[in-house]
Image (tube, grey):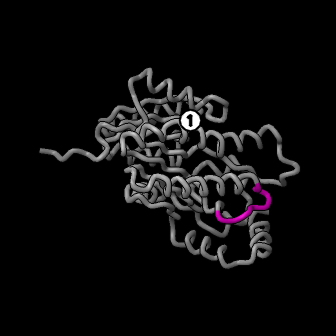
């Protein structure tokens, strides 16, 4: 008799799931028996991903295209799930984006979208679905932060600050959830080969020329294992771990100059 998969009877809701880390994480959850709810703005890519994952792993996978940066998105997502008779056992907050350039010259509307998606939407989604996890004494939340969370980031100031918020919130919730059966993990990758860099207009940044981006698949594998183990924080990759470690002993003024040079 085949052994029951760990995620059987549970549903993982994954944002930013149309590609990159989100899609690779979706495949890992599906392989573990979780049904999937994939959320992103790209309807076509999301629908294809859901169909492919369902066929490959024999799980239920649905696509819910929506813009999570819009107010009320978390409530709508919960309502949509309830209408389909589904719940959120595991939440993966992967949706987010960055902007490269001087803060004073940033497009204001785009800047507010970054804050709304990277901070507000993640907070709303977590607050919306966490109570049921606590009641069930199982499940968890995986928040995709960044190695940028450990330092200020000149020329990507709002992005770095948003990821510092994600890391701080996640670590606090990890402590609050200790002993409840609910796992909370922050993932803090360095550069990963996804569409993030193109969207942030970072193609010419020195940082990307110096460090070879990790594959989204490898990042997802490390992240998934860390979540399964209940780790508070995971920094995928030895080089990224070393870089983050260095920031903790580098004077802030020196670190600011270094980050500025790498992103110019």
Height in image: 69 above or below 201? above
Mark 1, residue position: 40
Residue name at image x 51 percent, y 62 percent: 233
Front residue of 33 and 202: 33
Left/right of residue 209 with respect to residue 213 in the rendered view: right
Residue 64 picture location, percent across and down: 51, 29
Crowd around label 1: few <14 · some 14–19 · many ≥20 (10 Å): many
Residue 76 picture location, percent across and down: 56, 26
Residue name at image x 38 percent, y 59 percent: 229
Height in image: 12 above or below 65? below
Q: Which residue is situated farthest in the right direction here? A: 104
Residue 169 picture location, percent across and down: 59, 53
Secondary structure type for disc 1: strand
Height in image: 80 above or below 95? above
Magenta: predominant secondary structure element? Answer: loop
Q: Which residue is situated farthest in the left direction here? A: 1
Left/right of residue 54 with respect to residue 115 in the rendered view: left
Height in image: 99 above or below 44? below
Residue name at image x 39 percent, y 55 percent: 179
In the image, the segment drawn in magenta is 150-157
Residue 4 picture location, percent across and down: 21, 44
Left/right of residue 29 with respect to residue 165 in the rendered view: left
Quarter of the N terminus within the rendering = top left
Query: Magenta includes 76?
Result: no
Front residue of 50 and 138: 138
């Amino acid at each position: 008799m085949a052994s029951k998969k760990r995620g059987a009877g549970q549903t993982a809701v994954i944002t930013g799931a149309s590609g990159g880390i989100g899609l690779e994480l979706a495949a890992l959850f599906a392989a573990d028996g979780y049904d999937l709810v994939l959320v992103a703005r790209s309807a076509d890519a999301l629908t294809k991903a859901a169909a492919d994952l369902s066929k490959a792993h024999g799980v239920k996978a649905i696509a819910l295209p929506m813009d999570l940066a819009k107010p009320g998105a978390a409530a709508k997502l919960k309502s949509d799930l309830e209408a389909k008779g589904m719940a959120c056992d595991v939440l993966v907050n992967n949706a987010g984006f960055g902007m490269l350039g001087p803060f004073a010259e940033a497009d204001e509307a785009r800047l507010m979208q970054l804050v709304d998606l990277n901070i507000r939407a993640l907070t709303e989604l977590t607050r919306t679905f966490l109570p049921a996890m606590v009641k069930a004494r199982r499940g968890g939340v995986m928040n995709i932060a960044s190695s940028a969370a450990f330092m200020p980031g000149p020329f990507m100031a709002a992005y770095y600050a948003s990821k510092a918020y994600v890391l701080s919130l996640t670590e606090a919730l990890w402590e609050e959830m200790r002993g409840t059966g609910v796992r909370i993990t922050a993932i803090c990758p360095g550069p990963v080969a996804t569409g993030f860099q193109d969207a942030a207009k970072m193609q010419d940044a020195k940082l990307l020329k110096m460090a070879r981006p990790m594959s989204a698949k490898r990042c997802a594998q490390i992240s998934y294992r860390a979540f399964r183990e209940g780790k508070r924080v995971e920094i995928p990759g030895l080089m990224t771990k070393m870089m983050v470690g260095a920031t903790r002993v580098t004077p802030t003024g020196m670190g600011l100059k270094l980050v500025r040079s790498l992103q110019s």
